Structures are given as C-alpha cells and as structure tokens.
Amino acid sequence: MPVSFTASRGGAAVRCGDVKIRVIGGGPGGLYFALLLRKSTAEHEIEVFERNRPDDTFGWGVVFSDETLGNFLHADPATHERITDGFVHWDRIDTHVKGEVIRSGGHGFSGIARRRLLQILQERCRELGVALHFERELSPEEALAGADLIVAADGVNSRIRTAMADQFRPDIAIGKAKFIWLGADRAFDAFKFFIRTDDAGMFQVHAYPFDAEHSTFIVETDEATWRRAGLDRMPVADGVAYCEKLFAPELDGARLLVNKSEWIGFRRVKNATWHADNVVLIGDAAHTAHFSIGSGTKLAMEDSIALAEAVRDHRDVTSALRAYQEARWLDVAKLQRTAETSQAWFENISRYRDLAPTQFAMSLMSRSKRVTHANLRMRDPAFVDRVDRWYAASQGHGGSAPTPPPMFVPLTLRELVLENRVVVSPMCQYSAQDGQPDDWHLVHLGSRAVGGAGLVMAEMTDVSRDGRISPGCAGIYRDDHVAGWRRVTEFVHRNSKAKIGLQLGHAGRKGSTKLMWEGIDQPLPAGNWPILSASAIPYYGHSQVPRAMTRADMDDVRADYVRATERAIEAGFDLLEVHMAHGYLLASFLSPLTNRRTDDYGGSIENRMRYPLEVFAAVRAAWPAERPISVRISATDWMPGGIEDADVLAIARALKAAGCDVVDVSTGQTVPEAQPVYGRMFQTPWSDLVRHEVGIRTITVGNVQDWDQVNTILASGRADLVALARPHLFDPYFTLHAAAEQGWGGVHWPVQYLPAKPR
Ligand SMILES: Cc1cc2nc3c(=O)[nH]c(=O)nc-3n(C[C@H](O)[C@H](O)[C@H](O)COP(=O)(O)OP(=O)(O)OC[C@H]3O[C@@H](n4cnc5c(N)ncnc54)[C@H](O)[C@@H]3O)c2cc1C
Ligand SMILES: Cc1cc2nc3c(=O)[nH]c(=O)nc-3n(C[C@H](O)[C@H](O)[C@H](O)COP(=O)(O)O)c2cc1C
C-alpha cells in the first residue's frame, strides 16, 4: 500500500492527490522515473517536458549488463520485456591491435538503439497516463516555479544544476581525450576495441552492435594526436572521413554515420548533493561515468527506480529526496571511481603502445580493476590460458607444461633468480636493541621465507645510530650487527627457496620518534638524538627540528651508506634496496614539500635528486655487480605542491641510468597532512607509469589483497613483482596458500611441512 506523499506549497501542506511533479528532460532517466511513479501511484500529477521532438535523439546505442536488466525486470516487467525484445546480445570482447584479434568471451551484454529505448519509455508513459510535452524547452525559471517536486533529468549540461550551482556545488572535469560518438551501418559480431596508429598518433574505437544492421562507433584519441591529425581544424564530415580511412580494414566496407556528432572532451560530473529544497537531480545531471564502461543510461535508470521508490514510500519531499540520495550515493560513487580508472587507461593508451597484443588486451580488460585474472578465467578459460602462456614465454619460461600462473613465473635480476614474484614488503618491527636484530627478526623473516614468497625484504635498516626512526629500529651500523643479520640470511637460504633483501635507510626528519605502538612519528619525550633533513622543517609542529644537511653531513651519510652496504654483503643479503620513500632522509631531498634548499640540492628535480643519486651511485659501486639493487620511491605525496609524475619519471630514468634494477613504487608519508585515496591496488598506477614510460622493472605495493590481484597486475604488465606487507602479517604462508588454491604444485614446500602439501 503506497504511503501518501504530501508536500508543502507556500508553507501550506498539500493534500494527497494535489502533488504536482515536473520532470525536466525526456531522456531515459526522466521518462523511466515518470512511468515508474505513475505505475506505483495514480495520485500525483506528473508531467515531462522535453525540448526535442519524440523521435529526435542524439547518439546511437546503449548497453546494459545482465545485472542491470534484473533491476529493470523487478521495477516494471512490461518495460523490461519490450527492451529485451529489441536487444542484440553478445558475450565476446575483441581487441584488434597490431594486426591481431584477441578474443575474450563470457561477458554477457546487450545493446539497444537509444531511439528504440526512448520510444519504449515514451509508449509506456503514455499507456500509464504520464503527460509528455515535446518541443518544450523550459528555462530554469519556468522549470522551478509552481511544482511541488522538480526532477532535473536534463542531462550532462543541466541548466537547472547550473542555475542552482551554489546549492548542488557541481564538480565538473573535462577529460584529456577527444572523442566523437558515431554510428556504423554494420552490426559487429562482438564488442570491439579497434586500435590503430598513424603518423599523428594512436586512435581507439569502442564499437558495439545495437540492432541487426548498426553499431555504435566511438572514436577516441588524445588531444595532441587529434591536433596533429588536423581534426581540430577540419569540418566534422572531413574528420569522419579521416576515421573511415583509418579504420577501413575494420569497417570492411561499412560506412560511418553521424547524428549531431562532434569531437568533445568527456564531462565528468559530480555534485556535492543531488537535492536542494524540492529539486532533485537524476541521471547525467547528477553524475556521469565515462562511456568506456557503458553505464550512463544504466545509472540514470537506476536513479529513476530509487527516486520513484523514495517518493512512493515517504510522506514528504525532503525525506523522500534524502532517502533517494542515500540509496544511490555509494553505488554511484563506486561506479564513478571505476569509470575514472577506465577513462585514465584510455587517456594514457599510448603508454601501452609497445605491449604485445595479448598483454595489451589483458591490460585493457583489467583496466578498471573490476575484471581480474580469475574473473576472466571463469568467463573464458582459453583467453586466460593464452595470457598465461604468453606471460611465461615472454619471461623466458615458455614451453613448460603446465603453464604457471603469472605469480609463479620466476624472475631473474642480474644473477639473482627469484622463484616467484611475491615479495614480503619491508616492515619495521621496532624490536631491535641498538640496531641489533634478534630472535624476533629470525622468526618473523624466517617464517615468511618458509611461507613461500620469492623475495623477503628485511625492514628498513638504518645506516647509522642517528639514522634510526625509533630506539627499536634495526640497523647495520655496527660491525657486530653483521652476525645478527647473518643468522637470518643463513636460515632463509638453508630452509627455503626465498631470497632475502635488505632495505637501507636513514630516517631523516622522521627520526628520534616513538615505537609504532607508542605513537607513530611522535617525538621521543626524552633521550632524543640529533636529526638531519634536506631542510630544517619539522614533521609536525611539535616535532624535533632537523638540521638542514651541510655538505660535510652529506659526505658522512654517504660514507655510512657505503659501510652499511659492505656489511650487507658480509651478512649474506641477495638484494639491496635503497629507501628513498616515505619522507625519510633521501626522500626529503626529492619532494618539493620537504626540500626548500636554494643550493645545488634544491629547486629543480635535477637538483633535488642530486644527493640521493650520489648515495645510490656510492652504494651501487660498493655492492657486487652480479647482485641487484632496487630503490623505493614515493611516487606522489598526495598533496598539492608535492612530487609530480614528471618528477617520478625523471627520478626513475636517472636511477635506471645509474644501474638500478628495480623501482619499488610506493607513495606518500611525506607530510602528515597528506590526503591519500586508498583503494585496492591504489599505488599500482604509478608502477604502471614508471614501468612503461621508463622501461625499468617495478615492484608494486599497497592494498594488494589476494593472489588474484597479484596475477592480474603481473599479467597486465603493471609490475614485475608484487609486494604485500600487511597480508603477510596475518598469513606468513600467503604464497603456499596461493599455490594450493590455484592447484599449482611447482612451489617449494619445506620437507618438514610436506604432509600438508595438497596432492
Ligand atoms: C559517447 C557516449 C557514449 C555513450 N554510450 C553509452 C552506452 O553505451 N551505454 C549507456 O548506458 N550510456 C551511454 N552514454 C551515456 C548516456 O547517453 C547518458 O548517460 C544517458 O543518456 C543519461 O540519461 P539522462 O536521462 O540522464 O540524460 P539524457 O539522455 O541526456 O537526457 C536529457 C534530456 O533532457 C533534455 N533537456 C535538457 N534540457 C532541457 C530543458 N531545459 N527543457 C527540456 N528538455 C531538456 C534533453 O533534450 C535530453 O533529451 C554515452 C554517452 C556518451 C557521451
Ligand atoms: C608494520 C609496518 C611496517 C612497515 N615498515 C616499512 C619499512 O620498514 N620500510 C618500508 O619501505 N615500508 C614499510 N612499511 C610499508 C609497507 O612496506 C607497505 O608499503 C605498506 O604497508 C603497503 O602495503 P600493504 O597494503 O600490503 O600493507 C611498513 C608497513 C607496516 C604495516
């Protein structure tokens, strides 16, 4: 039984039956809301105003997933039936690149012409008695006067949103790429990604069928390519001819069609709120999601379902609109985030120009993080088998049967062979006495080596006593530390196939602080030691003030690094990592937020990296040529004014030239006021950036939660090694578990534990 809906007009309560609802915009969002509300209650007066004629419609087809269709069935079976009657189905996504077609099946999508969808929604509105007014463009003033509820379904350029911008507080970002929404007079037999490069640059097409004779054909390219091609200066018709010529092999005689088509940048719309007074935004007026995930119409129609339910179930406008927003906010935010990740992949597509077609397709398929190696295996095992075979072969391990999952493909770095690509990320234990590792370190690192990881990194280990973060930090600054570490490396080498690395560090301005569990980064109340940094800026206002390093300090610290390196050789480590991340001493030179120097070590990125590179060169010279070195960097400070992508690339290029084998790409911890955006695999985009733009191996780290994500990252070429920190704290046997769960027998089990090995 619907709850009666009351509203207040001019301060007076409006009786049920008198409520006037005005919908601005007869797109999918506006029409669907009107028909659903009319269906659930005949009490309100609902009118839709649309500026176009009933048959006018821009664009071509829309896509829906099977899940979205389930929502439509529930909301109104009659609409669902008509929509599904008009459908073209496909379950394959084909990537056409460099003369190859990589096919991936099992995706389950349906397409319908936008024109047909609107006809169905209009018909259904008429049947249910919704008043539709076409060719009626309402100004915001007209739209907002004299109705109890105003539904702004007026699309991406919503004038109502603009007129009430101070209340909705829209946030609109224009994408870096240019695209044009075209049609093709051919129904492709799958969803198609066509990738072509000409003298101007790289172009991509997103194409899918929407009826028996036609497909949507969206051409997209980066702005520089678009300008080089002259598309900015050509009439649209000439630009379309350009695309027809470029994609002639894929079109195979089909023609491209226009319908109010023009080259534009994608408008990503968000609003601080979707309702104000008695006005509510739905669909594109409220939020947009990049077309590469094909969800705009779905989002608009799901908004309509939620708003119609809220109006039906609440007694007053304010609580109905609040309930609508609450019902939709999280889902929309998640989808927008997915869409932004997908959009960024396409905007940076030229980064992937050198990938082999198979890996290119894998990177494309997994771009938004929602589709993973394991999802794809469920959808289409043959596709994933092909990816895995390609991956193993590309790393020099082809031909072995069975093919290992990507995480179990060995990696050779100089003369060091890692059995698999799982890294136990360095984790301070705050359990050493004057730098000396003890039984805790032996058990902690030893058990993780026994657990099967390819590389176990010991924690940040300081090159000097004054370089420690806390009194509990491990060090390698006294000769007798060597024996303590040797005990650990010998255990690891004797009892596992893991290799063990040491991370050399100096805490810089974050030194002389409490143990993690007593107050991370908080200054010690007593017993402090002098601290150094690039500039004399304390971490917190109440932190100890570091001394800006003099040249003499630089010489001393560099010498400490070299002596520590010599001890690390004696201690038997296989790999060395130089810590240039997380705001510690060397990082403090790299970030403009912590380096305010005006000498040769501050200012430009060349100057800021001068000292860290000097230390690196000294360490590299002291470390055996056959053993690899990695460097951990913070690729963003998560703060305006901090390190930028261009700086990161300059650093990675310089490190590569200086003999660094792997860049371990972390982020943040530079300044306490940083605003990191956490999410699964949240730091991997920077690993992807460094790996492809610089052509150096990378380790990614940060919220990698399971082995499926590890395989996805590796197979798609986003990193060469995957480090996990916290997951290894609750599961030292992460790698053995991963092998068992994937049925992979090629992992080393300690003989003592063989009874547990799955057969
Ligand atoms: C290139 C491209 C490809 C896309 N591909 C897909 C896809 O494959 N699948 C998908 O689901 N979505 C896709 N979308 C998104 C999709 O088109 C929109 O997300 C969807 O149409 C949103 O529906 P809506 O009802 O909110 O807005 P719209 O469909 O934009 O409808 C708004 C309506 O309001 C009318 N209007 C505006 N102002 C006024 C006024 N003042 N008075 C009267 N009428 C007014 C307009 O004429 C229009 O008809 C794509 C978008 C683009 C740009
Ligand atoms: C207890 C703890 C100690 C850490 N110590 C270090 C360290 O010594 N050196 C370092 O570079 N990162 C250190 N980190 C960061 C981790 O190596 C890793 O980058 C971070 O935890 C993100 O990975 P995760 O999401 O898998 O935990 C530490 C993290 C934790 C949880």
Image: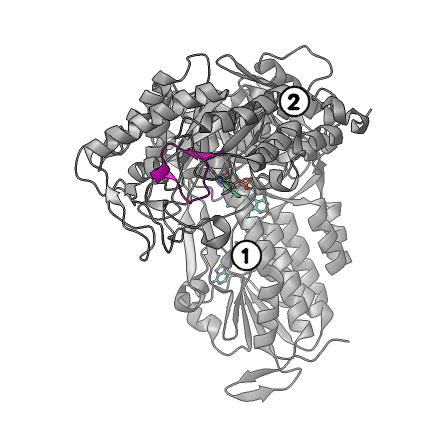
SS under mark 2:
helix
Between 267 and 651, the residue placed more toward the observer is 651
- Going by the numbered disc 2, the residue's amino acid type is Asn
Neighbours of disc 2 within 10 Å: few (<14), some (14-19), many (20+): some
Q: Disc 1 and disc 2: Cα gap in Å?
A: 76 Å
Specify the label residue 543 is tagged with: none
Q: Residue 272 in the image: x percent, y percent?
A: 46, 62
Q: Residue 606 in the image: x percent, y percent?
A: 25, 30
Q: Residue at x 73, y 24 (%)?
A: 744
| Number of the front mark, 1 or 2 | 2
Q: Earlier in the sequence, mark 1 or mark 2?
A: 1
Which residue does the numbered mark 2 point to in the structure image?
495
Q: Residue 297 in the image: x percent, y percent?
A: 60, 51
Inspect this view and state whether residue 214 appears. no
Residue 687 in the figure: left or right of residue 216 = left
Q: Which residues are magenta?
A: 459-474
Which residue does the numbered mark 1 point to in the structure image?
53
Name the colour scheme: one colour
Residue furthest toward the front? Answer: 480
Q: Quadrant of the C terminus?
A: top right
Q: Residue at x 42, y 63 (%)?
A: 169
Neighbours of disc 1 within 10 Å: few (<14), some (14-19), many (20+): few
Between 345 and 505, the residue placed more toward the observer is 505
Q: Residue at x 54, y 46 (%)?
A: 679
- Going by the numbered disc 1, the residue's amino acid type is Arg
Inspect this view and state whether residue 268 appears. yes
Q: Residue 161 in the image: x percent, y percent?
A: 45, 63
Residue 461 in the figure: left or right of residue 124 = left
Count numbered badges in the picture: 2
Q: Is mark 1 within 8 Å of ligand 1?
A: no
Residue 615 in the figure: left or right of residue 40 = left
- Residue 748: image quadrant is top right
